[in-house]
Image (cartoon, rainbow, N blue to C red):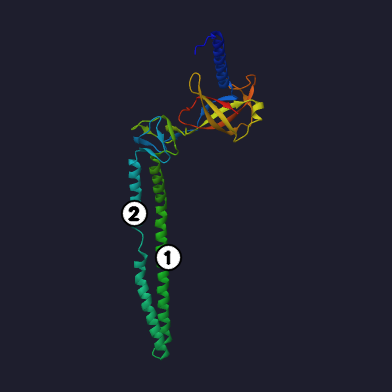
Amino acid sequence: MRITNTPFAATVFLATISTFIISCSGTKDEFDATGTFESVETIISAEVAGRLDSFAVEEGQIVAAGQLVGTIDTTQLSLKKHQIQAQIDALLTRRPESNVQMASLNEQIKSAIRERDRVERLLRSDAATQKQVDDATTQVNVLTRQLDALRSSLATTTSGLESETRPLLSQISQINDQLAKSKIIVPLNGTVLTSYAERYEMTGPGKPLFKIADVSTMILRAYVTGDQFSQIKLGQKVQILVDKGAKDYTTYDGTITWLSSKAEFTPKTIQTKDERANLVYAIKISVPNDGKIKIGMYGEVRF
């Protein structure tokens, strides 16, 4: 069927297109606050000095907590550990063998006790004198005191040697700790943002090696006016709009996780719903990231 009312059809068509354009532009411009995305960034630094024997870190690399990404040369630490261990072994070789040294006195004491018992039996049958019994008893007592003195001397010698080894054992523990810290292990899941070092370079305690951030969940720091601030709360669900193209955007679900306790002047790069507002409140919104949100991107918020 042919349409003959051309002017009317054109008018309806233009009106429909105009409504669509106005609707689309109105939808995109409707936001309550804007802000930029950020993430918690952690700089991983070296804890010991030495050459980077291995370092497998690249910008953009996804790493997991506990992952070994590099090692620092441990040659000198290992040599020092062997040297201290040799000193400990040398000291311990001087430790007396208490059981061996006391075995002879123990046998003498047993023999003296048997002799005393024999003399006491002879005394009861008038075949020995009291002086002989006293002499035998004295011999047992003398040998017993000698054994006690030897035991104390051996214990003192052993204790002294152990005291000398304690500082060396502490040094071994320190070296073991440094050896463990020579392994560069990632402390958290995340993405490498920046690498500051290369393999075979020299490093030292506190020198940055790489920067990492967990970008699976991004934080949108936005600013709201006082009127808006009184109407939002922690845990509140909001919509986040991120530019997808010239005339399109992607919508994400976000959760308010932090509210500032004091007002501040509006940052120059931030737009608020009321441009006349001089004082605004900062808020943080947690947004699950599908990989498209990048640090520094702008986002718009709908409450």
Which residue of the protein is positioned furthest toward the bottom in this rendering?
A: 125
Q: Nearer the viewer, residue 215 or 85?
A: 215
**What amino acid is found at the position of numbered circle 2 in the picture?**
Asp
**Dot 1: element:** helix
Q: Earlier in the sequence, mark 1 or mark 2?
A: 2
Q: Residue at x 36, y 33 (%)?
A: 202
Q: Which mark is residue 89?
A: 2
Q: Quadrant of residue 118?
A: bottom left
Residue 74 figure quarter: top left
Image coords of residue 83 (percent x, y): 33, 47
Question: Identity of the amino acid at label 1?
Answer: Ser
Q: Nearer the viewer, mark 1 or mark 2?
A: 2
**Taking 80 as reference, is 236 above or below it?**
above
Q: Is residue 240 left or right of residue 61?
A: right
At 43% from the left edge and 86% from the top edge, which residue is drawn?
130
Name the secondary structure under disc 2.
helix
* Mark 2 crowdedness (10 Å alpha carbons): few <14, some 14-19, many ≥20: few
Query: Callout 1: 10 Å neighbours few (<14), some, many (20+)?
Result: few
Residue under numbered circle 1: 152
Who's the residue at 41% across and 64% down the image?
A: 153
Residue 102 disc label: none
Q: Position of residue 146 (x, y in %)?
A: 40, 70
Spatial separation of the CA atoms under disc 1 and disc 2 = 23 Å
From the viewer's perspective, tell me whether residue 210 is left or right of residue 266. Answer: left
Q: Quadrant of the C terminus?
A: top right
Q: Position of residue 236 (x, y in %)?
A: 60, 34
Where, by quadrant of the figure, is residue 120 drawn? bottom left
Farthest residue toward the front?
1
